[in-house]
Image (tube, helix red, strand yellow):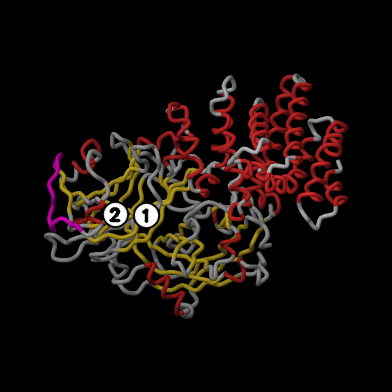
Amino acid sequence: MASSPTHSLYVFVRNFVCRIGEDSELFMALYDPQKQSIISENYLVRWGSGGLPKEIDMLNNLKVVFTDLGNKDLNRDKIYLICQIVRVGRMDLKDTNQKKCTLGLRRPFGVAVMDITDIVKCKTESDEEKQHFIPFHPFMAENDFLHCLLNRVISTKTGDEKGQGLWVTMKMLVGDVSQIRKDYPHLVDRNTVVARKLGFPEIIMPGDVRNDIYITVQYGDFDKYNKTTQKNVEVIMCVCSDDGKILPNAICLGAGDKPVSEYRSVIYYQFKQPRWIETIKVAIPMEEMQRIHLRFMFRHRSSQESKDKSEKNFAMAFVRLMKDDGTTLQDGTHELLVYKGDSKKMEEANIYTKLLSTRPASELKGYTLSRSNTTLGGGLSSSSRDTFVISTLVCSTKLTQNVGLLGLLKWRTKPELLQENLEKLKIVDGEEVVKFLQDTLDALFNIMMEHSDTEKYDILVFDALIYIIGLIADRKFQHFNAVLEAYIKQHFSATLAYKKLMTVLKNYLDICCEGKQCEPILRTLKALEYIFKFIVRSRSLFAQLYEEKEQVEFEESLKRLFESINNLMKSQQVTTILLQVASLKYLPSVLHDVVTVFDVKLLRVLAFDDIAQGLKLVCTERFELNVGYSQILRVWVI
């Protein structure tokens, strides 16, 4: 099972037994205790005060698959299935007079955890009928946090709380969502919720479009100002347009839950430095990204309804999800500036969006303002007495955090920078390139097709293609071979690319035969298999479109290309020795594709009469290789 690139964990929540007396929210996720981090989206189950799901239709139907798990996840030392329980109701359960109490407050209630390492690694047989009990651990002290209780329970491995907890069944499944729906229809049906990994799967197949932005409300530090006790701080987050309008249903609190227009945090009672560690997902159309921002409001919540109604937002913060250069906000932690002022002014986007959203680097490095408010324009003031920190994670196959890659993907907007952006691709981090593999390849071949009447960018595009193929050959990204194969077969459509690819390749070979330096040639020979796959696919598409037109010209070009390879193999130049070895290693891989578009008899003549002579020369005269000539010829038999 470990050899499969993608895995999924199926979980069926059979029952939740807990004496709460109010509605509650169950947030279930996969957790790495060593890194103390959640590694999947939360699966949200809303549980009613009567001991049943809020939506009675969900009874006996609370199923989820945690997807996108790769071999790296299976190799984690430990993986836990965790459940954080938040009750929704009064500030204090001891308050009996509900008519006077503020209701609808999200309060911490407890956790449930289970070590599922052996199930995930298939050391224990996972049976979808076997029920597992996950004990509940209550939130006892007001000076505690849910995530601290979670880590404490994992480390101490304490017993169950009087039979309260979760009953679940689970099973490890092989494959991504589409695959497991085919292979396990009795488990994964249209009602089964999909909770994706926080991050990309190890393989991103063409067509897997994703634009998920995860916001984790980390912690804050809020001064009590004129109050005698610390505030009960509630964070309210919404997604706003440039004019301040709230985008409806742009926030997802957890997989399986309906999208909402605002997020409200858990409230920790009278705490100066609350640490929420709550992750929500922002899901909006990509075309809206440049025009939106996140707005955070901070409000003190009173346990008495009469007082709570008079409370107004005491501060705010905001952040844009895209920067001015068109890239997204960098993954990681961001300390946002906290602004105070009139509660109405704090809602006017034309005022606060003109201000800084994050704390300047000079302050983060040790320089800080005095512990006071700095008055700014528009009636708002930044407070150095208050702190608010979030972290972000962008999982998008369309929005990049790299300026160089963005320039290439959006090359039509600034064509004057095209040459520079093509050259920059080679210094873009490999993980970012493979993440946008389909879009990057589309951009390269669109450049080639839209400049079919000139050779200006041919070499740059060819070298960029070689760089990408080389990346995928690297052990770190070798699982993307399947993605490249799928792209060539299903998405590649450049009908004229074969002409330009063959021309550049032949030029490189001819330069080497003359004994001249050609820096990219070794990388090119290593990439021969996929260069020819692109050539063959391009020619096939052209032939289908134009009814075998220019077949003679194509065969002549291909024959001349093989003659250049033959010349390289026969070359006596000292500089070609390493290249001849590389050719001997990589040339056989191209024949399987070439025979689909080239005359078999002619190719056999080229292979045996010309190239085989070059191979014999390499093996017998220039090297003492422990490879029999007959073995080499067998590789070339068609």
Q: Give the structural element (helix, strand or loop) at label 2.
A: strand
Crowding at mark 1 (Cα within 10 Å: few <14, some 14-19, many 20+): some
Q: Position of residue 587 (x, y in %)?
A: 75, 43
Tell me the residue at 25%/39% (across/down): 353
- Quarter of the image for the C terminus: give it: top right
The quadrant where residue 141 appears = bottom left
Q: Which residues are magenta?
A: 367-379
Q: Give the structural element (helix, strand or loop) at label 1.
A: strand
Image vertical order of residue 22 relative to residue 437, above or below: below
Q: Amino acid at mark 1?
A: Ser
User: Along the polypeptide, which appears first: circle 2 or circle 1?
Assistant: 2
Is residue 222 or residue 322 the one in the foreground?
322
In this image, 482 relative to 362: left or right? right
Is residue 425 or residue 159 the one in the foreground?
425
Q: Amino acid at mark 2?
A: Glu
Tell me the residue at 50%/76% (across/down): 163
Report, in whole angstroms, how far the alpha carbon at label 2 lies from the one at label 1: 9 Å
Residue at which label 1 appears: 391
In this image, 489 relative to 160: left or right? right
Crowding at mark 2 (Cα within 10 Å: few <14, some 14-19, many 20+): many
Residue at which label 2 appears: 335
Q: Could you tell me if the residues under marks 2 and 1 are in contact, i.e. CB atoms within 8 Å?
A: no
- Quarter of the image for the N terminus: give it: bottom right
